[in-house]
Image (spheres, grey):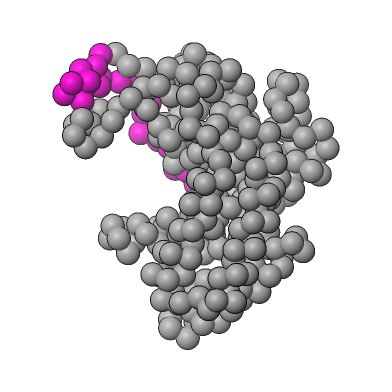
Amino acid sequence: MDAPPSQEDCAPWLQVQSRLLEAGVHVPEVLALDLEQGFLLISDLGSTPYLAALQRHSAQDRTREIHALYSDAIDALIRIQSSPRHDQLPPYDRALLQREMELFPNWYVAKHLGISLSAAQREVLNQAFERILAVNLAEPNVFVHRDYHSRNLMLIDSPGCANPGVIDFQDAVFGPISYDLVSLFKDAYIEWEEEQTLDWLIRYWEKARKANLPVRADFGEFHRDYEWMGAQRHLKILGIFARLFHRDGKDGYLKDMPLVAKYLRHTCERYRGLGPLRKLLDELENRAVQVGYSF
């Protein structure tokens, strides 16, 4: 790892790495370091992310292998969430959750769609944000990886080594327990039938209860938390993908926007409290079509 101190700070990565390693999570090990120059020698987790393995398995309809990969990911996530060392992690609080959702109007709507929200539309969005935040902030809190998805989980083929390898954890926070589950099961880069993700979610919930994690005793309530957490994340991701394109010139994420938008719309259609947001999405879509975009 080459991280010049003037440009990057290795400290957050090192702090989270040590906690995850202590929790029994397979993360890169630090073999040597020179923080003054920003050099770290770390162990190699290979070159096959879950995404590549899942796409290969999906094409071959290898259901057993796909299930095994997700089972391993669930077990690793429970170890992450069970880590007692969440002290000093930044809180995933109202300010941060709100700031993330603001990426949607600022980058997706204004920059990507080229639409200026009216005062009435902005008020609909504000009220939706408040409803989403109320559910998010009522969730029990745990160690949150924050990007626990198929591109940050590595397939480990080495005998005796735990699968998956986990990377890109430097932005970890202490926040809602369902957040990483949304990242994993409502992945922006690969889609599964809801029946399948619901099965995985139930398996997680059962294992989490046995591990004494603070999940809701009622699965219906837990599932609702998960869905509303998804609304927060999907609004954020649409904004991030738009920013990556318009600010950073990275167009590779444009192809992933429709799936994220699909997740968001499906949740809004399911819950009455998100009905006004769904209507706003309809308005944005109708206007976007006129200028050549598809929501």
Horizontal side, residue 167 vs residue 216: left or right: left
Q: Nearer the viewer, residue 19 or 266?
A: 19
134 shown above or below 26: below
Q: Nearer the viewer, residue 211 or 138?
A: 138
Residue 140: % across, % down = 68, 34
Residue 152: % across, % down = 44, 37
Q: Nearer the viewer, residue 249 or 137?
A: 137
232 in the magenta segment: no
223 shown above or below 144: below
Residue drawn where x is 48% and y is 79% of the image: 288
38 in the magenta segment: yes
Q: Which residue ends up furthest to the bottom in the rendered image?
A: 290
Residue drawn where x is 43% and y is 64% of the image: 106
Which quadrant of the figure has residue 65? Answer: top right
Horizontal side, residue 192 vs residue 44: left or right: right
Residue 158: % across, % down = 43, 19
Q: How many marks?
A: 0
Horizontal side, residue 158 vs residue 215: left or right: left
Residue drawn where x is 58% and y is 35% of the image: 175
Which quadrant of the figure has residue 103? Answer: bottom left
Residue 257: % across, % down = 48, 62
Give the magenta part as a residue range. 32-61
Q: Nearer the viewer, residue 289 or 4?
A: 4
Q: Quadrant of the N terminus?
A: top left
Which quadrant of the figure has residue 5? Answer: top left
Q: Is residue 240 visible?
A: yes
137 shown above or below 99: above
Residue drawn where x is 59% and y is 41% of the image: 179
Q: Is residue 64 visible?
A: no
